[in-house]
């Protein structure tokens, strides 16, 4: 699975990048045959003002059913990554289920 991690207005440490890679890989490994690529963008929305300002966007390019996009915001970057990884797993499962159901009924 091709996984790209980028920071937007936020330099990513090796620890954050590795956390993203571990979480996303773990969440999507059961779908690995159907995943063409994954793009993760981590941004600091509010800068120094604080708040729930860390945004993690994940886009999964699925074979046959198109992209799945999920976003999560949190004050803590690690919490945002953990939450978005769970949500992306559920969203990919739903998308593939709908795709399979559509193929069955066609």
Image (tube, rainbow, N blue to C red):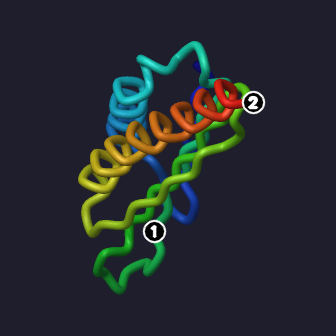
Q: Earlier in the sequence, mark 1 or mark 2?
A: 1
Closer mark to the observer between disc 1 and disc 2: 2
Residue at 32% over, 56% down: 80
Disc 2 secondary structure class: loop
- The image quarter containing residue 77 is bottom left
What is the number of the mark on residue 56? none
Disc 1 secondary structure class: strand
Q: Is residue 56 above or below residue 23?
A: below
- The mark total stands at 2
- Nearest the eye: 67 or 72: 67
Residue at 57% over, 38% down: 98
Provide residue 102's location: percent of width, then percent of height: 66, 34
10 Å crowding of disc 1: few (<14), some (14-19), many (20+): many
10 Å crowding of disc 2: few (<14), some (14-19), many (20+): few
Provide residue 54's location: percent of width, then percent of height: 38, 66
Residue at 65% over, 31% down: 62
- Left or right: 101, with 19 as reference point: right
- The image quarter containing residue 85 is top left
Residue at 45% over, 56% down: 56
- Left or right: 67, with 31 as reference point: right
Q: Which residue is mark 2?
A: 106
- The image quarter containing residue 99 is top right
- Nearest the eye: 17 or 72: 72
Provide residue 30's location: percent of width, then percent of height: 42, 17
Q: Is residue 88 above or below residue 45?
A: above
Q: Quadrant of the C terminus?
A: top right
Q: Which residue is mark 1?
A: 44
| Furthest-top residue in this view | 33
């Amino acid at each position: 699975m091709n996984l790209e991690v980028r920071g937007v207005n936020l330099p990513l440490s090796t620890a954050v990048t590795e956390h993203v890679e571990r979480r996303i890989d773990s969440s999507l490994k059961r779908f690995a045959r159907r995943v063409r690529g994954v793009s993760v963008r981590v941004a600091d929305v509010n800068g120094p003002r604080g708040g729930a300002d860390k945004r993690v966007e994940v886009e999964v390019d699925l074979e046959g059913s198109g992209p799945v996009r999920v976003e999560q915001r949190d004050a803590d970057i690690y919490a945002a990554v953990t939450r978005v990884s769970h949500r992306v797993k559920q969203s990919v499962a739903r998308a593939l289920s709908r795709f399979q159901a559509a193929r069955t009924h066609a």
